[in-house]
């Protein structure tokens, strides 16, 4: 395995101005890196490096943004999420195949000689597609790879009825094999489906891949109820600049793709032991276009180190979330979005929730209840949350609307305190 | 010999680095940055006062009212108007809407405009009358014959823009106005949003009835735009909004409007921003006008010659520097998305430039056929920044354009 890393280092050094400068600034040459220990001498590379140096500094010599198979994309934002990048279509496919390989329920998606018909219902990304205005046609929103992007408002809950109807109509017309969704978005569509008496069906077998944000159990419950058992749902670990980093197996466990990437989980500059949380660093393998070495993703995971009953060789991990989404408590504990979600559970009485820690450390849990909610449900949850969030003050608030982030994503757990402290 | 003071130091936002890189701000036709003196004026009002104006007799209110009205005098004086002829509103768009709706034109009224106008000088007129648009030549210069023929239809209003925010063309407004006055009795409404930031105007010499401009395009805060109206013209205008602050007397079933300009300023205004606007005007007036103009011309020359020297960009606008501001709108080769180029210029090179239709979709569609990239310079920019932008553009287009053989 490490030979492949060394090749990638040599390639990146040779072919990209940025990585050569990065190594030279640290008095390193590719020959200095002979082992996984040596590897740690290379300081991590960051999103900001790749943003600042794209394309001239990070595109491998010999490529342009118009070379065959190059897919380019941008995502907006002012934070660390802002991105301009490019990827080779076949790298994306290779990574996707490895990741989906952990879940046999997705096997039939890729039959030889066919491409699945993909429909995306996710936070709008207006930079790569005219998605948020009502003026676009299906053709305008079909990406070069054939994926149809459905329109959705930036503020999900403010999506007007005509746009929801349009989404149902277009899914019906497009007949997808695969819905790539943000689970909060699909749960929203599911609630509307019940109200409008509409369903999501396709003549071919439908599959759902959920990405973009943490799939809450509340969202998953609604999606499963709406689509039924026959539709497999899998949680994807992914980043737009890298594609599939992992996937959920049919037993519901998450596996990380360590075949197409060299993965590290790092805390305070050191690899973490199994069972401990660390930031995911990615090194691409055989990425001819934008090789990345020790790319700090900002996403945290706990490698579990055990084997999973599903039989796959890809290692099991637990998703913990981004540093800016972690609640920091006065006693030094950190509560991850995943832990919050476990405490909330699938809460059949609830449509949506969001926990927000303000800069003083106080936490507010807002939720939108449905008609089945009883006082006991709320009291019990309130008690569990108070225990979880320990010394910090927290309160629970019933609301009938919760805003999305500016990016159009709906994050179920955010910490303004952590965001202020994270550089 | 380099005696020129670099204005850059006066603009704290230009000290920022993004991803470890200094920034170059070249989207000045949209909005300019603010000098420290403007920021200080605003902060000073909030720090030491913060009260309302014209609403009472206490000390803080009197002080705030004085500062607010003194600002009006500064703004009015800048364009050669009397203080009571200057209405302080939110922006040029609001000012032009006030005129269009307040003139109470009949449904058949004809309005003559120009195809290169900003949406703000098109849509309000389309709503209240029949708008005829004067055409421009491929360089964006107005078609004088066409203009003349439209005047013969006896329009009620002639809505002109001094300078186009797409082509950078400065129209021969003085001559156009003389023609209007000689042929018909139309009300002349001038959009000076792009021109005034670059050159002084004297409304009386110019003989306009109304003129609008925005302070945010000339170093001032956002949220302040002005409408100049000749006093007789203003007196005949119907206010857009009614409420507090614009009446002298209200009883159970009637009210008496205040005099101009107050009757157009309903509700509590953006007091701090008005005070900041005066600071912006003071900053501009303190600059040496000759040196400033020369600098503007140098920037314009760099923008135009840079575009003309390249085969993979074309200039939307005249290929010369006379009667033109330091602004270049570029059309890129087919298949190169302007929005993506603007993003990469920003994120990878630190150049903040604008992409899109520039709120002048009819013209941009006509001259460019689609979205464009606009680079607009102001007092704190240097020629070297423009050269740097073109070099960055070369590198980008080399990586984005069709593979060179
Ligand atoms: C020529 C012209 N007119 C009017 C406007 C509108 O100004 P504001 O947005 O301040 O109303 C602009 C601003 O871009 C402009 O360039
Ligand atoms: Zn498994």
Image (tube, coloured by chain):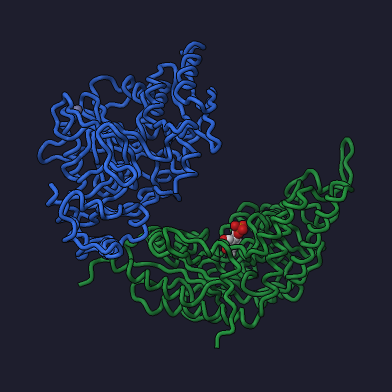
Chain colours: A blue, B green
Location of residue A327 in the rendering, given as x and y in whole percent from the top left corner: 45, 33
Q: Residue at x 43, y 73 (%)?
A: B315
- Residue B98 higher or lower than A213, as above or below: below
- Residue A386 higher or lower than A93, as above or below: above
Where on the picture, by quarter, is residue B173? bottom right
- Residue A113 higher or lower than B142, as above or below: above
Q: Residue at x 29, y 49 (%)?
A: A241
Location of residue B322 in the rendering, given as x and y in whole percent from the top left corner: 55, 81
Location of residue B32 in the rendering, given as x and y in whole percent from the top left corner: 58, 64
Report the front residue among A181 and B291: B291
Where on the picture, by quarter, is residue B401? bottom left
Residue B260 seen in render: yes
Q: Residue furthest left?
A: A112
B32 sits left or right of A198 in the view: right
Q: Residue at x 50, y 39 (%)?
A: A417
Report the front residue among B1 and A125: B1
A165 sits left or right of B75 in the view: left
Location of residue A214 in the rendering, given as x and y in whole percent from the top left corner: 36, 33
Q: Quadrant of ligand 1?
A: bottom right
Report the front residue among A263 and B344: A263
Number of numbered discs:
0
B364 sits left or right of A300 in the view: right
Q: Residue at x 15, y 36 (%)?
A: A110
Report the front residue among B307 and B178: B307
Residue B155 seen in render: no
């Amino acid at each position: 395995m490490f030979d492949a890393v060394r090749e990638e280092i040599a390639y990146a050094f040779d072919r990209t101005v940025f990585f050569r400068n990065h190594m030279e600034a640290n008095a390193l040459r590719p020959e200095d890196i002979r082992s996984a220990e040596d590897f740690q001498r290379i300081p991590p590379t960051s999103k900001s490096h790749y943003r600042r140096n794209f394309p001239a500094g990070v595109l491998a010599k010999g490529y342009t943004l118009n070379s065959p198979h190059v897919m380019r994309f941008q995502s907006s934002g002012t934070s660390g999420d802002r991105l301009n990048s490019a990827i080779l279509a076949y790298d994306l496919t290779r990574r996707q195949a490895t990741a989906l390989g952990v879940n046999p329920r997705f096997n039939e998606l890729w039959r030889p000689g066919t491409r699945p018909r993909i429909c995306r219902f996710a936070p709008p990304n207006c930079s790569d597609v005219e998605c948020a205005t009502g003026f676009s046609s299906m053709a305008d929103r079909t990406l070069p790879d054939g994926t149809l992007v459905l329109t959705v408002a930036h503020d999900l809950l403010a999506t007007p009825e005509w746009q929801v109807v349009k989404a149902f109509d277009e899914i019906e017309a497009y007949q997808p094999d695969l819905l790539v969704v943000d689970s909060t978005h699909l749960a929203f569509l599911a609630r509307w489906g019940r109200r409008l008496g509409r369903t999501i069906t396709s003549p071919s077998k439908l599959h759902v891949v959920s990405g973009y944000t943490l799939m809450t159990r509340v969202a998953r419950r609604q999606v499963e109820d709406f689509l039924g058992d026959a539709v497999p749902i899998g949680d994807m670990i992914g980043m737009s600049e890298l594609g599939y980093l992992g996937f959920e197996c049919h037993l519901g466990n998450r596996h990380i793709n360590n075949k197409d990437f060299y993965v590290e989980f790092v805390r305070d500059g050191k690899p973490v032991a199994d069972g401990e949380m660390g930031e995911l660093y990615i090194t691409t393998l055989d990425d001819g276009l934008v090789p990345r070495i020790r790319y700090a993703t900002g996403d945290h995971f706990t490698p579990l180190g055990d084997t999973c009953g599903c039989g796959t060789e890809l290692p099991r991990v637990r998703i913990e979330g981004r540093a800016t989404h972690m609640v920091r408590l006065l006693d030094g504990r950190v509560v991850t979005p995943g832990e919050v979600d476990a405490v909330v559970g699938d809460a059949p009485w609830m449509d949506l929730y969001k926990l927000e820690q303000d800069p003083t450390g106080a936490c507010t849990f807002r939720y939108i209840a449905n008609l089945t909610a009883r006082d006991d449900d709320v009291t019990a949850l309130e008690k569990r949350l108070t225990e979880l969030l320990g010394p910090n003050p927290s309160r629970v608030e019933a609301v009938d609307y919760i805003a999305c982030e500016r990016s159009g994503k709906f994050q179920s757990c955010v910490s303004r305190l952590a965001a202020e402290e994270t550089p | 010999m380099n005696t020129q003071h670099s204005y850059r130091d006066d603009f704290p936002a230009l000290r920022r680095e993004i991803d470890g890189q200094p920034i170059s701000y070249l989207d000045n036709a949209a909005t300019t940055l603010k000098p420290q003196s403007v920021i200080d004026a605003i902060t000073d009002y909030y720090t030491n006062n913060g009260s309302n104006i014209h609403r009472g007799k206490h000390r803080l209110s009197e002080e705030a009212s004085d500062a607010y009205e003194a600002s009006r005098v500064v703004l009015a004086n800048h364009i050669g108007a009397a203080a009571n002829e200057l209405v302080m509103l939110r922006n040029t768009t609001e000012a032009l809407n006030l005129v269009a709706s307040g003139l109470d034109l009949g449904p058949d009224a004809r309005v003559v405009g120009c195809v290169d106008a900003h949406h703000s000088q098109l849509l309000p007129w389309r709503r209240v009358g029949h708008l005829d648009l004067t055409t421009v030549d491929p360089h964006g210069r107005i078609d004088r014959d066409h203009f003349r023929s439209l005047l013969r239809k006896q329009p009620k209003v002639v809505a002109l823009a001094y300078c186009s925010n797409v082509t950078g063309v400065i129209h021969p407004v003085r001559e156009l106005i003389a023609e209007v006055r000689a042929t018909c009795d139309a009300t002349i409404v001038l959009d000076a949003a792009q021109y005034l930031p670059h050159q002084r105007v004297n409304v009386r010499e110019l003989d306009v009835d109304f003129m609008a401009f925005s302070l945010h395009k000339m170093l001032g805060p956002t949220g302040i735009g002005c409408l100049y109206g000749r006093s007789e013209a203003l007196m005949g205008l119907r206010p857009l909004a009614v409420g507090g602050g614009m009446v002298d007397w209200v009883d159970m079933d009637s009210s008496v409007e205040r005099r101009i300009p107050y009757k157009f300023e309903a509700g509590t205004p953006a007091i701090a921003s008005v005070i900041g606007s005066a600071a912006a005007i003071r900053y501009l007036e303190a600059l040496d006008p000759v040196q400033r103009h020369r600098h503007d011309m140098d920037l314009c020359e760099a923008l135009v010659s840079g575009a003309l020297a390249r085969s993979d960009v074309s200039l939307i606008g005249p290929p010369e520097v006379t009667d033109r501001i330091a602004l270049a709108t570029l059309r890129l080769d087919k298949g190169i998305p302007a929005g993506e180029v603007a993003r990469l210029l920003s994120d990878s090179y630190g150049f903040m430039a604008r992409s899109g239709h520039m709120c002048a979709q009819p013209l941009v569609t006509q001259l460019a056929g689609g979205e464009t990239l606009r680079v607009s310079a102001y007092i704190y920019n240097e020629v070297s920044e423009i050269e740097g932008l073109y070099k960055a553009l070369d590198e980008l287009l080399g990586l984005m354009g069709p593979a060179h053989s």
